[in-house]
């Protein structure tokens, strides 16, 4: 798995409706690290990226209405 681009990170945050601060707190990293990754000043590591994707996916499933 490769590290995400800043555009990848920004797209996921936008889709999830999260700020960089919220996303950082959800995956246990410093908010400034997430802000720097979104700005392209640093790379968000593959494990952190994958965790962010998993949490976003779970949040999306939780937002669905219950089955009938």
Image (cartoon, rainbow, N blue to C red):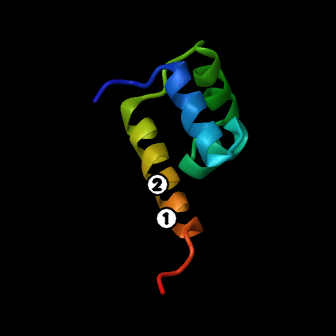
Figure quadrant of residue 11: top right
- Furthest toward the top, the residue is 41
Above or below, 1 against 43 in this view is below
Q: Which residue of the protein is positioned furthest toward the left in this rendering?
A: 1
Quarter location, residue 63:
bottom right
Residue 55 against residue 6 in the figure, above or below: below
Q: Where on the picture, by quarter, is residue 65?
A: bottom right
Counting labels gives 2
Residue furthest to the bottom in view is 68
Residue with the most extreme front position: 68
The residue beneath circle 1 is: 61
CB under 8 Å between callouts 2 and 1? yes
Secondary structure type for disc 2? helix
Query: What x and y, as percent, mark residue 50?
Result: 39, 41
State the mark number for residue 35: none
Measured as percent of width and height from the top left, residue 6 is found at 54, 20
- Quadrant where the N terminus sits is top left
Quickly name the residue at label 2: 57
Residue at the spot 61% in from the left edge and 23% down from the top edge: 38
- At a point 53% along the width and 59% down the height, the residue shown is 60
Nearer-the-camera pick, 61 or 39: 61
Which sits in the foreground, 53 or 21?
53
CA–CA distance in space, label 2 to label 1: 6 Å
Q: Residue at x 62, y 44 (%)?
A: 23
**Residue for point 52% across, 51% down:** 56
Badge 1: residue crowd in 10 Å (few <14, some 14–19, many ≥20): few
Neighbour tally class for label 2: few under 14, some 14-19, many 20 plus, Cα within 10 Å:
some
Judged from the image, the secondary structure of the residue bearing numbered disc 1 is helix
Q: Position of residue 64 (x, y in %)?
A: 55, 69
């Amino acid at each position: 798995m490769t590290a995400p681009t800043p555009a990848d990170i920004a797209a996921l945050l936008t889709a999830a409706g999260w700020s960089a601060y919220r996303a950082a707190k959800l995956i246990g990293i410093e908010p400034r690290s997430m802000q720097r990754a979104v700005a392209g000043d640093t790379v968000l590591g593959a494990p952190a990226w994958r965790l962010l994707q998993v949490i976003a996916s779970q949040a999306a499933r939780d937002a669905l209405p219950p089955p009938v």
